[in-house]
Image (cartoon, rainbow, N blue to C red):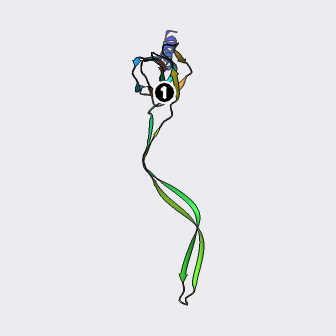
Amino acid sequence: MKKLLALIGALACFTVSAQQNYVTNSMAAGLRTIIPEAIVLESLQITGTSNTIVRIWDGPTTNVVGAYTNYTSFITNQVRTFVGVNGLTNNYTNTLLYTLAQATAAATNDVTPILVLNIGANTTPFVFSTPTVFTRGVNVSNNNGGLTMVVTYHQP
């Protein structure tokens, strides 16, 4: 019986994910990575000392795409003309599949935030308690600073 209870306790320890909290105090204006790894957000509580816009991203705020070649295939007509030894001009039209290679330059594009909030100064805290999966980490930016966040999460 003792061995059975010990086994059940060990299994419970392996299956329970520990919740963790992350707290910011008077977060300054600008972009900040608050959790640099994949998480499951369980709750988020935000208050501010000034009116500010808060943006939350899953991972980096920009997406960099390297240069690549884009291939496009289409059907077109090819006209061949030649002049015979007798001086007559002959035209032949053939339909063929043509492949065009086009170079596409590298680009950096902005990523759309997952959540955009308008936090009022010294008002009741904004509370978001729907589980949300962040696959590449959590980045937060705000406009005016004075932001306090309490993030409760666990790792997937």
How many numbered circles does the render carry?
Answer: 1
Relative image position of residue 103 (x, y in whole percent) = 45, 55
Which residue lies at the image location 52% right of the left edge and 27% below the top edge?
116
Element assignment for label 1: strand
Q: Who is closer to the viewer here, 35 or 118?
A: 118
Which residue lies at the image location 52% right of the left edge and 24% below the top edge?
117
Relative image position of residue 69 (x, y in whole percent) = 46, 54
Q: Who is closer to the viewer here, 85 or 120?
A: 120
Q: Residue furthest top?
A: 2
Q: Who is closer to the viewer here, 50 or 91?
A: 50
Which residue lies at the image location 59% right of the left edge and 78% below the top edge?
91
In the drawing, does residue 129 fall left or right of residue 148?
A: right
Would residue 115 be seen by someone viewing this image from the given angle?
Answer: yes
Q: Looking at the picture, which amino acid does disc 1 mark?
A: Ile
Relative image position of residue 155 (x, y in whole percent) = 47, 23
Up/down of 111 relative to 1, above or below:
below
Q: Residue furthest bottom?
A: 86
Which residue lies at the image location 51% right of the left edge and 56% below the top edge?
71
Would residue 18 be seen by someone viewing this image from the given angle?
Answer: no
Q: Which residue is mark 1?
A: 56
How would you rate the neighbour count of disc 1 (Cα within 10 Å): few for under 14, some for 14-19, many for 20 or more? many
Relative image position of residue 131 (x, y in whole percent) = 55, 22
